[in-house]
Structure formats: structure tokens, C-alpha cells
Image (cartoon, rainbow, N blue to C red):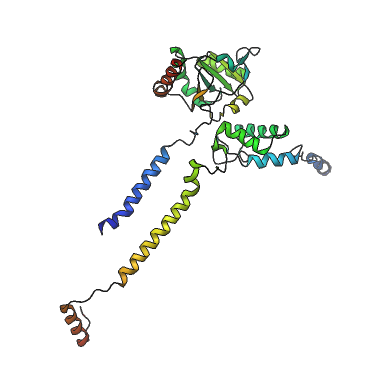
Amino acid sequence: MKARYLAPLGIFMGLLVFLGIGLNLNPREVPSPLIGKPAPAFTLPDLNHPEVAFKHTEMLGKVWVLNVWASWCVACREEHETLLQFSKTGVVPVLGLNYKDERSDGLGWLKQFGNPYQQSLYDHDGLVGIDYGVYGVPETFVIDKRGVIRYKRIGILTPELLRDTIVPLVRELQGNA
Amino acid sequence: MHKLLLLLLICLFAGTSFGKEAAPAAEDPELEKRVTAISEELRCLVCQNQTIADSHAPLAIDLKNQVREKLKAGASNEAIISFMVERYGDFVLYRPPVKATTMLLWFGPFALLAGAFVFLFVVLRRRRTSQIEEVPLDDAERARAKKILESGVQPE
């Protein structure tokens, strides 16, 4: 008899657990279909030197990190300090993809906040961004020596994420021939 | 007199201020119809409960332009949809495909409904049998009932 009255409470608790889990999931973290696939090909001008073209194949043989950023992106500012610290460690080359930005704005931003990038590529119309499935800047990709995307982060980088996920992954990839 | 003349002049020129005809929304309405049809199948990833046809987010506009460019280049609807899925995953489809991973999504609600019906059926059946169940009176109760019936007095 008692169990009968406790049942609704039990069901309610169960519902609470599910709703709690649902609230803590991030709907923006959409699994990327690009993981395990070759990084989309592109040729883009350098942000600093419009006349210099960069081709994605230049990074073959190296593990590298591609960070998508823009001067209009508020969250990029938030992760910037972390990224500066990270690129200083020199664990892995960090390249920037300046996404849908004005060249002068992008350059001004780097001047003001510091430049963590070995090189920034200038994707003015965002077409390379579309090829990489970019929809929420900042986004970060880890690409292996064979040019395959191994990891994608949508949203800001945190020191914990770098320490626990990205750095171990990079080390592992660098170990593999 | 001056005021009247001024008024007359204003009335005369009023018409010219909105004389321009609305420009057509698109150069090629047929193409635009196809762009919209495809856009309605694609989710805007910035504002996730809208299709890119509904959304004015910059990314949605870019994607719509991509759809338009590809249609102009002669791509089929399927080719454009798979172009988007390759980049953004199944999530970009406003109507998720039926796959092993989406079984729960598609059929979960029906399973819940069926479960609820089974539960209701069981509860109703149990209730009916428990109501019909007869509880025989013991001798003392029977004697008391008899007394009450014979006396015709309401029991307290």
C-alpha cells in the first residue's frame, strides 16, 4: 500500500534526473562528421601578407592546431589568454583561421590582445569555414601528420581542456610516425 | 492665399515621393523557389530551432548563398543536402533520417504511448476485479445487520 503512494514520487524523481541531465548537455556540441576525415583542402591568403597564399598541404607531416577566430567574436576574447599561454609552450604549431572578418579589424585585434598564431589565414567570405563545418566561433581543430582531423572543439578552450584532452592527443599523434 | 498655394503644391508633389515600384525579390523566381525548398530542409546551426530559410543569422545567409550557387552550377537537391551533411552532420537535417542511432528518437514516443496503454489496461483490469470481489460477513456482523434492519433505526 505504501509503495503505491511512493510510486509517483519515484517517477517524479526519475523525471528530475532526466531533466537534470538534459539541462547539463550542451546543444551546441554537435558531433562533427569531419573527425577521422581528411581536413578539407583550401588555399587562403595570409592575414598579414595578402599576397602570400597558404595551402593546407604545407602542414603535412606535422601535427597542428587550427583555431577559428574573428575580431567580432566575444568568446574568442575569452579564450585568448589561454591560447596565448598554450602557443607559448610550443607543444604544437597553432594556426589561426580569421573567419568572416575585415583584414584591418583582424590585424588590429591581434595587435591589441597579442598574437598566439604562427600564422593566420584570411577567410573573408567564410567559405573555408563552411567546408570545415564552422558555425560557432571559436572552434579548434587538431589535425594529424597525414592531414586528418582528429579532434574538434566548438566553443572556447579552457586550460583544463588543453591539459586533459588536447595536449595528450597531440603528444600521442606526434608519437605516431 | 500663400498658405493655400503651398498646400496645393504639397498635394501636387506628394504622389512623386512614393512612385517607385518594388524591385522583384529575385532575378530568377524559379531558382529562388528551389533555394527555399532546400533551405527548409536544413537546420540553422546558430539558432537551432529554425531552418536556414527562416533564419537571418549570417551563417544561414551564407549557407543559402551556397545552395543558390550550387543550384546555378547544376547540382541536384540530393547533392546539396549531402554537401551539408558532410560538413555539419545529420544534425543539419531538419527531418532526421531513420537510422540505428535515431531509432529512439523516431519510435521512442510511440513506445512510450504503447507502454502507457498497457499500464492503463492493467490498472483498469485490476481495479475491476478488486471491486467485484465479495467480502462475506462473519456471524457477528450478520447478527448486527439483522438487528439494524429489524429495528429500522439508523445506526450512529
If the image is split into quadrants, where does the N terminus of chain A sit?
bottom left
The x, y position of residue B68, in whole percent, is 69, 34
How many discs appear? 0
| Quarter where residue A101 is shown | top right
Q: Residue furthest left?
A: B140
| Quarter where residue B60 is shown | top right
Residue sitting at 27 percent across and 74 percent down? B134
The x, y position of residue B57, in whole percent, is 60, 34
Identify whether A143 is placed above or below B134.
above
The x, y position of residue A9, in whole percent, is 32, 52
**Can the viewer see residue A149?**
yes
**Can the viewer see residue B25?**
no
Residue sitting at 45 percent across and 16 percent down? A176
Residue sitting at 67 percent across and 38 percent down? B77
| Quarter where residue A52 is shown | top right
Question: On the picture, is B71 further left or further right than A17?
Answer: right
Q: Which residue lies furthest to the front in this view?
A: A177
Identify whether B59 is placed above or below A71.
below
Question: On the picture, is B97 further left or further right than B139?
Answer: right
The x, y position of residue B48, in whole percent, is 54, 38
Residue closer to the observer: A57 or A93: A57
Identify whether A132 is placed above or below A89.
below
Residue sitting at 71 percent across and 42 percent down? B33
Question: On the picture, is B54 further left or further right than A82?
Answer: right
